[in-house]
Amino acid sequence: MAYNPHRLLAAFLRKGTVPHAILFTGIEGAGKRTAALNFAMSCNCENTGGTEGRGQDDRPLPLTPCRTCRSCRKILSGNHPDVSMIEPSGPLIRIAQIREICHTLGMKPYQARMRAIIIADAHTMNPEAGNALLKLLEEPPDRTLLILTAVQTSDLLPTIVSRCQHIRFHPAPQDHLRMLLTGEKPGFSEKPGFHGLSEKEAEIIAGLANGSYSKAISMSRTDRIRRRQWLMTELESLFLSKQRGDPHSAGRVLAFAEKLSKNKEILPELLELANTWVRDLMICKYDAEKIINRDVSDKIQNISRKMTAADLLSKTEAIQSAQKKLRANANVRLTMEALALQLAW
């Protein structure tokens, strides 16, 4: 049977061995937060009729939360006094946030059978916060569940990892995402503002999402496919302008940089699309079956043949450097002009 994190969580409930601390790791959008909230709901669900699970106190629990009882509704709305999610304050989770958790856990739950604290993006804890959390993990209070989410275990203190039950969330298979996007499988259809996509649209977005549920649902609500088409056309023109001896190439470069700069709110998305496009041009030289933008594979192969691997590598590095500079709040216009020049030469 394939590894399934949800079956592991159900097994904890079935056996009555719910840990005090669990660590979920996996790429952004792999479903870690959703699983954490669902598990917290199962541990506190009031609808226990015909259930097979047991909590830390050996009382019956459902393997799957009902999502309709008072406790489940409060958790879903973020209003349960005993279930909370801690997120980074700015770029970091700070010691004051962990101290607040310690203070909260020093008291008995108000309503819940098991108090649950979800620390999202635990890898952003600063050293002081990490050490404060470690003390809590060494002596966890009764009727307490701590769930940490992170990208990978190496981003956390080894002593924190060793005190948690580790569960790995793998990227979602592309075909699974496609079926969710078309509505063939339930899941996304329950999301506000979601409308099922056509097979072609779903296949494109499922490939671009790179196994991330959150990216897939976000892309389905935007003009992602139209933006991708525009970007591919612009990049092709830039990449091949030098070979064509285009006398207007300098003007094209500056115009492209200006268009990127004027779309600050979607600039991270555009740069990620550009990175994926160049990655496909490189991968195509070695294994065309592994490209992401499969619907335009002929175009990718045609452009790839006209470019060297070294040239594509330098363009990848240029895009990633621009992404890093923007995260550090560099000047957007200057960064985009420098990037456009590097992509064109």
Image: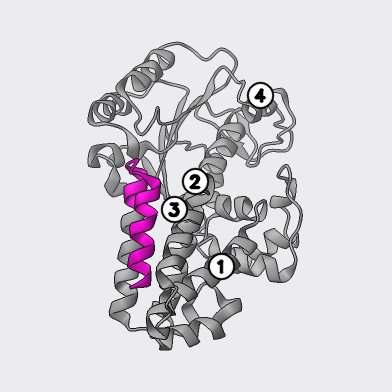
Residue 147 vs residue 188: left or right?
left
Name the foreground residue: 218 vs 112. Answer: 218
Which residue range is magenta in the image? 324-345
Q: Is residue 221 magenta?
A: no
Label 1, residues with CA under 10 Å away: few <14, some 14-19, many ≥20: many
Q: Do the residues under discs 1 and 2 have CB atoms within 8 angstroms?
A: no
State the mark number for residue 264.
Answer: 2
- Mark 1 or 3 closer to N-term? 3
Q: Residue at x 71, y 34 (%)?
A: 67
Could you tell me residue 283's position as x and y percent? 41, 79
Q: Is residue 344 magenta?
A: yes
Please give the residue where the numbered disc 1 appears in the rendered image: 207
Real-space Cα separation, disc 1 to disc 2, in angstroms: 24 Å
Label 3, residues with CA under 10 Å away: few <14, some 14-19, many ≥20: some
Q: Residue at x 75, y 66 (%)?
A: 198
Q: Do the residues under discs 4 and 2 have CB atoms within 8 angstroms?
A: no
Q: Do the residues under discs 1 and 3 have CB atoms within 8 angstroms?
A: no
Of badges 1 and 4, nearer the viewer stands 1
Please give the residue where the numbered disc 4 appears in the rendered image: 74
Q: Secondary structure at mark 4?
A: helix
Q: Amino acid at mark 3?
A: Ile
Q: Amino acid at mark 1?
A: Gly
Of badges 4 and 3, nearer the viewer stands 3
Residue 173 visible to the viewer? no
Residue 216 sits above or below residue 33 on the image: below
Q: Amino acid at mark 2?
A: Lys
Residue 231 visible to the viewer? yes
State the mark number for residue 27.
Answer: 3
Residue 315 sits above or below residue 89 on the image: below
Q: Do the residues under discs 3 and 2 have CB atoms within 8 angstroms?
A: no
Q: Residue at x 31, y 56 (%)?
A: 321
